Image (tube, rainbow, N blue to C red):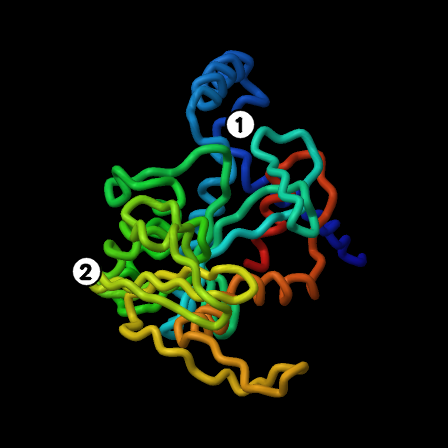
Amino acid sequence: MASRRKKALTCEEILELVFQSDDESDCDDDPEATSDHDSGDDESDATDDKLGKLRPVLDYIIKSIGSAYSPEEGLAVDESLMKFRGRLAYVQFNPSKRARFGVKFYKLCESASGYCLNFSVYTGKCEQTTATIGMLCSEAVVINLVGDRLTDGHTIYVDNWYSSPLLFLHINQAGSNAVGTVRVHRKNMPKELKKMKLKKGECKAFFSHGIMALTWQDKKPVNMLSTCHNTASVTDTGKKNRQSGLPVLKPQVVQDYNRGMGGVDREDQQLASFPIMRSASKQSLDLLSCTDVQ
């Protein structure tokens, strides 16, 4: 007699088994246990973690991708938007992104390859730890993502939403470096930068506590912070101006930033080749399908 093959489970059925606890399976046969379980659900819903059901899976994925690869020196921190238009409290709108509506991810990626080393899902509030007490939310995101790698001598590239003198001082004192664009109105920035008027191609730098604050006049003023550059010299980029034919000159810190900051964008570009997103009735399934290739 031919053996009967079992029907393969769908992705949704597998995920239902993952999220189903032992108590839930026992409740099917015990009415009293069902009422006890319902009261437990009310208590769990009262917690602040909006990713409560996904948290064990996300923690496992983050631990796995972080321990599977030893990155090079350059690391980039940036945000990414996962397309989602469902009813969800922490859906974000970003007109500069292609998706525009979706769930925001903060990512730590290797600059050279785009490999994702760590990520976090933004659910509407900042995650503060003992290491980030007193910091701005943008500063805490960087410290939490880098984690134990902060003492490994990496160079961390960030954009002007994250950068601040306080963050760079913290990273430098921990044993790593940081490079990034910065907003001139950040606390502890040199006041002279706000009043500086330079001709195109000129730059000016200020130094304090191992941090360089530089402004360079391109088409618009470009403001930089760095803990691993000690000069404001302008170097040849190897390119020529199409109109004048003269060499294009940029400060070395700007060139290094342009090379190192593209880690997250590089990862997003690679993920676009693997469209694994599937429609689901629950947002937890959408989030989990996105993390499959982080």
The residue that disc 2 covers is 209
Mark 1: which amino acid?
Glu
Mark 2: which amino acid?
His
| Secondary structure type for disc 2 | loop
Image quadrant holding the N terminus, namely bottom right
Q: Is residue 81 above or below residue 174?
A: above
Left or right: where does residue 182 sit relative to residue 239?
left
Looking at the image, which is closer to me, 292 or 20?
292
| Secondary structure type for disc 1 | helix
Give percent across and percent down for residue 45.
48, 22
Looking at the image, which is closer to me, 259 or 66?
259
Q: Residue at x 55, y 13 (%)?
A: 31
Q: Is residue 95 visible?
A: yes
Give percent across and percent down for residue 252.
40, 76
C-alpha gap between disc 1 and disc 2: 57 Å
The residue that disc 1 covers is 24
Q: Is residue 132 above or below residue 142?
A: above
